[in-house]
Image (spheres, rainbow, N blue to C red):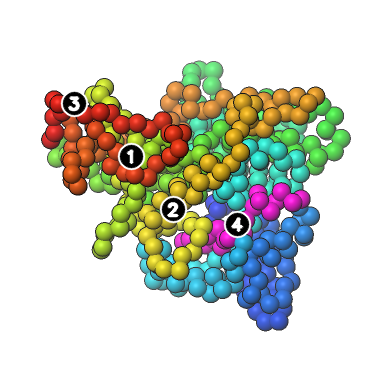
């Protein structure tokens, strides 16, 4: 079937994928590849069943006239509401699409009726393994625009949780892209109110919640949500001499949006659905489980509360050990171990992440594997990429690549993590973790100290800061 037009709202990464990308198969076929802004790149190709993702990727780049950096910056994805797959260059998209129902049955717990109706589309999206430091070196307008559109979609869909202040700043840049330089009275607060979800995440646009409640809490000088967005729009800086060419003048604003997103430690990550145990509460000590998304990228692992839209745990690879288990007839589990404290005393903390539905994968294995195994493998691969990368210079480590002689230095980035109460700060108190010591082959709870790491998987070569606390003779076990 041919693709259909998207809806009028801001779709998430998988919301547009109910449409087919192939209209016919034979000696010649029409293929639709969707971009992050929901536009389509039509391709007329021959021998589609044997075409690789690399060949289709090259065809898209030629149509869009993208520079060579796009080969590394973007990848082809097969995406549906039930599954997201980043393809390797050697994968054959058509053949994988024909196996889609089999993949859904293997990697998701979706109902049979949903599996039967699900159909993937081909999308041209950011490569999960493309480092931010290389993104800072891009100057091509169209590449920047595509990266901007994808980042904007992830912010508006709340896949990237942001603080209210940052939502306003990012929304203001979207206003600048859509409306041009700020002019007093244009657009009006009323005009913004009508399509506020085009600039801010939907959960912040509900009156009495999120953005409005937060703004009212600032004091009597705070305006409405629309006014806060307008104030941020007014502060967007213009580049001297760029107003004569509107399209060209947008590149600095695309770049500014991406730089702001770079402050988010989970930017560019792969996302998995999962659940964690809730801390026991109430007289009956009831716990239960809460849904989370697990973001795994080149900078580390982040566990995000899917309902509250904030980070529960953020760990760099140097700060964790991990492993996975797959008991028969039970959910697969990813275990994360990290340093913590119990009433002020250092302990090993162990977080158990249940996952039986996969939202993303990079390599389709020949034999069945569990979601926990895929997450574990992705962590290991990201560590390998990080260790293989060239060491950054002092300038690169703080604010991206070093500046060329005679050029102005890049702006200094101030991570959101320093902001008190930021949504990207860890909330370990909201986690139900195990404090333990290893004794033989059994894991026992400890009060309150620990002795050694239970897991062997951790960043090696002396680069990690993760360390164990030596046991004491008076160690109390429970």
**182 and 187: which is toward the camera:** 182
Q: Which residue is mark 4?
A: 7
Assess whether residue 75 is covered by the magenta stretch.
yes
Confirm or deny contact between disc 1 and disc 3 (CB under 8 A): no
Is label 1 or label 4 in front?
1
Is label 3 or label 4 in front?
3
Tell how many labels.
4
**99 and 473: which is toward the camera:** 473
The span from disc 1 to disc 2 (Cα, nearest Å) is 16 Å
Residue 417 appears in the picture as rendered: yes
Write the residue at 26% across / 22% down: 344
Confirm or deny contact between disc 2 and disc 4 (CB under 8 A): no
* The furthest residue to the bottom: 26
Write the residue at 79% across / 36% down: 249
Q: Which residue is mark 1?
A: 337
Confirm or deny contact between disc 3 and disc 2 (CB under 8 A): no
Q: Position of residue 318 (x, y in %)?
A: 43, 35
Q: Earlier in the sequence, mark 1 or mark 3?
A: 1
**443 and 92: which is toward the camera:** 443
Q: Residues within 10 Å of mark 2 (few under 14, many from 20)?
A: some
Q: Which residue is mark 3?
A: 472
The span from disc 3 to disc 2 (Cα, nearest Å) is 35 Å
Is label 2 or label 4 in front?
2
Q: Which residue is mark 2?
A: 377
């Amino acid at each position: 079937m041919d693709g259909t037009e998207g809806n009028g709202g801001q779709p998430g990464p998988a919301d547009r994928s109910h449409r087919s990308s192939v209209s016919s198969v034979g000696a010649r076929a029409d293929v639709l590849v969707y971009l992050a802004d929901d536009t389509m790149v039509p391709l007329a190709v021959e021998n589609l069943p044997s075409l690789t993702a690399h060949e289709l990727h090259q065809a898209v780049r030629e149509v869009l006239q993208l520079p060579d950096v796009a080969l590394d910056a973007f990848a082809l994805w097969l995406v549906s509401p039930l599954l997201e797959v980043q393809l390797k260059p050697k994968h054959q998209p058509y053949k994988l699409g024909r196996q889609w129902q089999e993949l859904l049955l293997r990697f998701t717990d979706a109902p049979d009726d949903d599996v039967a109706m699900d159909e993937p589309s081909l999308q041209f999206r950011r490569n999960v393994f493309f480092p931010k430091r290389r993104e800072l070196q891009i100057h091509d307008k169209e590449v920047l625009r595509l990266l901007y559109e994808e980042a904007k979609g992830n912010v508006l869909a709340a896949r990237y949780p942001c603080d209210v202040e940052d939502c306003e700043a990012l929304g203001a840049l979207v206003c600048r892209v859509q409306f041009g330089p700020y002019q007093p009275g244009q657009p009006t607060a009323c005009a913004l109110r009508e399509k506020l979800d085009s600039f801010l995440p939907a959960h912040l646009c509900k009156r009495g919640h999120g953005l409005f409640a937060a703004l009212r809490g600032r004091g009597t000088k705070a305006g409405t949500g629309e006014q806060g967005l307008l104030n941020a729009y007014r502060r967007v800086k213009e580049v001297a001499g760029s107003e004569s060419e509107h399209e060209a003048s947008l590149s600095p604003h695309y770049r500014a949006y991406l730089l702001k997103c770079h402050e988010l430690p989970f930017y560019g990550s792969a996302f998995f659905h999962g659940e964690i145990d809730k801390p026991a509460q109430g007289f009956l000590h009831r716990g239960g489980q809460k849904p989370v998304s697990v973001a795994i990228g080149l900078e580390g692992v982040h566990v995000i509360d899917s309902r509250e839209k904030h980070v529960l745990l953020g760990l760099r690879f140097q700060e964790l050990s991990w492993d996975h288990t797959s008991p028969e007839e039970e959910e697969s589990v990813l275990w994360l171990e990290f340093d913590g404290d119990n009433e002020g005393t250092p302990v090993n903390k162990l977080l158990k992440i249940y996952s039986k539905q996969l939202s993303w994968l990079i390599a389709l294995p020949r034999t069945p594997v569990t979601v926990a195994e895929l997450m574990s493998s992705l962590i290991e691969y990201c560590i390998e990429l990080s260790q293989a990368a060239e060491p950054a210079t002092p300038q690169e480590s703080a604010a991206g690549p070093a500046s060329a002689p005679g050029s102005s230095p890049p702006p200094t980035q101030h991570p959101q993590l320093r902001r008190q109460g930021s949504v990207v700060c860890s909330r370990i108190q909201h986690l139900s973790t195990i404090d333990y010591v290893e004794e033989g082959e059994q894991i026992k709870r400890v009060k309150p100290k620990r002795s050694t790491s239970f897991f062997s998987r951790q960043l090696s070569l002396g680069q990690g800061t993760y360390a164990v606390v030596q046991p004491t003779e008076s160690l109390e076990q429970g």
